[in-house]
Image (tube, rainbow, N blue to C red):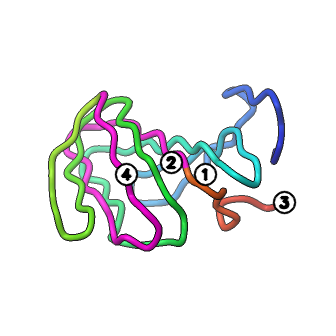
């Protein structure tokens, strides 16, 4: 699906990440990628880091995020920036959806 101009949600396979998280890789190119993550209440996005800049938009729900040791509760409409290599993770407080944008794209999320 890399460089696919039109990506219809109904055609995007859900990838069960376990522990209440489902990922859908949406449109992407070599430069940028959009990913939807659906979280059940209590699901955890374990602390991690990667060599990509990541912007997260909270579509719905509530999450306690930790970025570089600082914690905040975020809700629908909030946006978070995680620069290359910064440790981050979250706990879902209310079932919700996060929309992530990565630059460059996450090769580990796809099989091209």
- For mark 4, give the secondary structure: strand
Q: Report, in whole angstroms, how far the alpha carbon at label 1 lies from the one at label 2.
A: 6 Å
Q: Residue at x 75, y 32 (%)?
A: 11
Q: Residues within 10 Å of mark 2 (few under 14, many from 20)?
A: some
Q: Position of residue 59 (x, y in %)?
A: 38, 30
Q: Residue at x 47, y 39 (%)?
A: 99
Q: Give the labeled residue for mark 1.
A: 15
Q: Position of residue 107 (x, y in %)?
A: 70, 64
Residue at x 37%, y 51% (from the top left corner): 81
Q: Say left or right for 5 vs 104.
A: right
Mark 4 surroundings within 10 Å by alpha-carbon count, few (fewer than 14), some (14 through 19), many (20 or more):
some
Mark 3 or mark 2: which is in front? 3
Q: Earlier in the sequence, mark 1 or mark 4?
A: 1
Q: Earlier in the sequence, mark 1 or mark 2?
A: 1
Q: Label 1, label 3: how many angstroms apart (C-alpha)?
A: 16 Å
Where is 102 relative to 108, above or below?
above
- According to the picture, the residue beneath numbered tag 4 turns out to be 81
Q: Nearer the viewer, mark 1 or mark 3?
A: 3
The secondary structure type at the circle numbered 3 is loop
Label 1 vs 3, first from the N-terminus:
1
How many angstroms separate mark 3 from mark 2 (CA)? 20 Å
Q: In the depicted view, which residue is nearer to us: 46 or 74?
A: 74
Front label number (1 vs 4): 4
Q: Which residues are magenta?
A: 77-101
Which residue is denoted by mark 2 in the rendering?
22
**Left or right: where 12 falls relative to 35:** right
Q: Which residue is mark 3?
A: 112
The first of marks 3 and 2 along the sequence is 2
């Amino acid at each position: 699906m890399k460089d696919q101009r039109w990506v219809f949600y109904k055609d995007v396979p859900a990838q069960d990440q376990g522990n209440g998280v489902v990922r859908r890789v949406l449109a992407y190119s070599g430069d940028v990628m959009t990913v939807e993550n659906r979280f059940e209440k209590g699901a955890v996005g374990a602390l991690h880091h990667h060599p990509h800049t990541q912007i997260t938009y909270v579509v719905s729900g509530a999450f306690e995020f930790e970025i570089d040791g600082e914690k905040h509760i975020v809700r629908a409409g909030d946006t978070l920036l995680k620069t290359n290599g910064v440790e981050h993770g979250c706990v879902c407080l209310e079932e919700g959806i996060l929309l992530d944008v990565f630059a460059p794209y996450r090769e580990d999320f796809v099989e091209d």
